[in-house]
Image (spheres, rainbow, N blue to C red):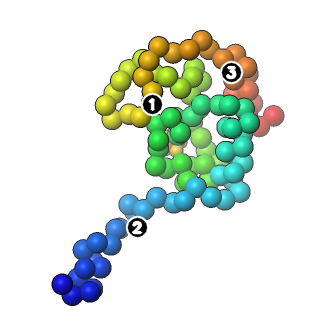
Amino acid sequence: MEEKAKERLYKKPEWLKVKLPIGEEYRKVRGIVDNNKLHTICESGNCPNMGECWGAGTATFMILGNICTRSCKFCAVATGKPLAVDKLNRNVLQNPLS
Ligand code: SF4
């Protein structure tokens, strides 16, 4: 097969490529989440948009823990009986930047 034809065949479109999770804002969000032991659907759901969202300073928190009672086949969140509500995390979520 011709080289250019191969390249066209195997080259992925730009919209399909996921950005690497890097940058100052990403590290800031990562620090807030890790330092406060917060749960996010971004991580629990293995969301492919983390690099883009966290890089823009956005994350979506799971306020009642990271275990879901449902077991939707398309979702990566752990299934089971939720643990007791972590009141410390709830307080942190009221103002995660403090
Ligand atoms: S905020 Fe962004 S990274 Fe988090 S779950 Fe939503 S789309 Fe995914």
Report the side of 4 relative to 93 (left or right): left
Relative to 1, is 89 above or below? above
User: How many marks on residues?
Assistant: 3
Q: Which amino acid type is shown beneath numbered disc 2?
A: Glu
Residue drawn 60% across and 48% down?
54
SS at badge 3: helix
Q: Is residue 34 left or right of residue 12?
A: right
Three-letter amino acid code at the position of disc 3: Arg
x, y percent for residue 42: 52, 40
Query: Residue 58 shows which numbered tag?
Result: none
C-alpha separation, residue under disc 2 versus residue under disc 3: 39 Å
Is residue 15 shown to the viewer in this render? yes
Which image quarter: residue 52?
bottom right
Q: Closer to the N terminus: mark 2 or mark 3?
A: 2
What residue is shown with label 2?
14
- Measure the C-alpha gap from mark 1 to mark 3: 20 Å
Binning the other alpha carbons within 10 Å of mark 2 as few (below 14), some (14 to 19) or many (20 upward) gives few
> Where is the N terminus found, in terms of image quarters?
bottom left
- 44 or 54, nearer to the observer: 44
**Label 3: how many Cα within 10 Å (few below 14, some 14–19, many 20+):** some
Which of the numbered marks, if any, corresponds to residue 77? 1
Q: Which mark is residue 90?
A: 3
Q: Quadrant of the C terminus?
A: top right
Closer to the camera in the image, 93 or 45: 45
- Residue shown at the point (68%, 21%) measured from the top left: 90
Farthest residue, direction right: 98
Query: What residue is drawn where x is 28% and y is 72%?
Result: 10
Task: Tell me which label, 2 or 1, sits earlier in the chain.
Answer: 2
Res 64 quadrant in image: top right
Q: Tell me if I can see residue 94 in this picture.
A: no
